[in-house]
Image (cartoon, coloured by chain):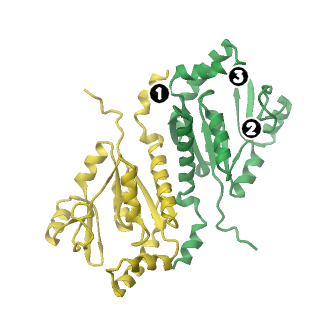
Chain colours: A green, B yellow
Amino acid sequence: MPTTAHKRRGLMFVLSSPSGAGKTTLSRRLLEMDTHLALSISVTTRPRRSNEMEGRDYHFISETRFQEMVRQNELLEHATVFDYHYGTPAKHVLDRLTSGTDVLFDIDWQGTRQLSRVAREDLVSVFILPPSMKELERRLRTRAQDSDEIVARRMSKATAEISHWQEYDYVLVNDDLEATTERVMCILQAERMKRPRRPQLESFIRSLK
Amino acid sequence: MPTTAHKRRGLMFVLSSPSGAGKTTLSRRLLEMDTHLALSISVTTRPRRSNEMEGRDYHFISETRFQEMVRQNELLEHATVFDYHYGTPAKHVLDRLTSGTDVLFDIDWQGTRQLSRVAREDLVSVFILPPSMKELERRLRTRAQDSDEIVARRMSKATAEISHWQEYDYVLVNDDLEATTERVMCILQAERMKRPRRPQLESFIRSLK
């Protein structure tokens, strides 16, 4: 029977940024490059956008189901943005962490703050900044489907989101997607080499003596 | 006049390993690859080996001078190994840290423990393990100039050194020099992206609003 005494527990890797700073593209690249990383799929009560897919981008659920999940303590964290609710289902995440898989979270500062309360040791948080507000607005406008009003709301939300940068472990400016992807990969790899996250080394080191 | 209020302070990057695990080669590669990194040159009372150069590998000093440096508090840390003394001159290191340059230390667990007492926030420590004791012995034997007795002493010293692995922030197994160099570079780059080490971001973030 295999022993699990020194089994490595996965880490919770949080990426936050204002909408348009490149976080979603970054997340997809990380997941493509790293097979030991799984995405935490949030639930949300907001309507699905045309480019989104159920179960890939979100689990789209009803207000009633969301409130039930909150009551049943099925969410690790939840937040409200522009009147819609978002949350992280606990079971999926905890199963992966226990099996040693790292889990990537694409969540905002509210979710990060709640996660850090339940998972301090396991959590690594990265904040991605846009190179400028002008560039952020340009990126939001090229998402053709958003109206002027929505872009203005998102810009104001972006400023609020950025004001929480000091709550994160790492902070990066996304001025180049390739370079930023590499930097985020580096952070993930470095965090995996931290001594408290390598319990499997104990038996290796015993074998050295 | 330039402001220094948000100037970045350099970090102290410690590499430790038993003799023969590849630490010195690794250090040289890091210094070649990274121009923001400077080596802390230790003083020692042991005789210079034929392949060593004064001021590159060590500052070779007399017992009298060493004792004077200890008395005058000129050393950040010092340790005794095989009856010879080793130490880190403080001034050189502190000048570099203040100017924002990161400093690499090629020191043992005794030195690391002392450094961590004076520089907790600024210190990042990495322990390099050999892939096996057999491989370590092979590497020590290929250093042609060491006698059987010295190799035996170094092997026993290696076991003692390895017993301190739990005092380090990161632990790596050097089974492949290229891969290990990349991993150590990743750790250094990730540590530089830690939020408390990026005071210069404060003015950038003010400019975003």
The answer to whether tags 1 and 3 share a subunit is no
Q: Nearer the viewer, mark 1 or mark 3?
A: 1
**Which residue is painted at 48% across and 63% down in the image?**
B177
Amino acid type indicated by mark 1 = Ile
| Image x and y of residue B137, in percent | 44, 79
Quarter of the image holding residue B101? top left
Between marks 3 and 2, how big is the CA–CA gap? 16 Å
Q: Nearer the viewer, mark 3 or mark 2?
A: 2
Does residue B127 sit above or below B8 in this rendering? Answer: below
Q: Nearer the viewer, residue A57 or A74?
A: A57
- Circle nearer the N terminus (3, 2): 2
**Label for residue B205?**
1
| Image x and y of residue B201, in percent | 44, 32
Say which residue label 3 marks.
A82
Q: Residues within 10 Å of mark 3 (few under 14, many from 20)?
A: few
Amino acid type indicated by mark 3 = Phe
Amino acid type indicated by mark 2 = Ser
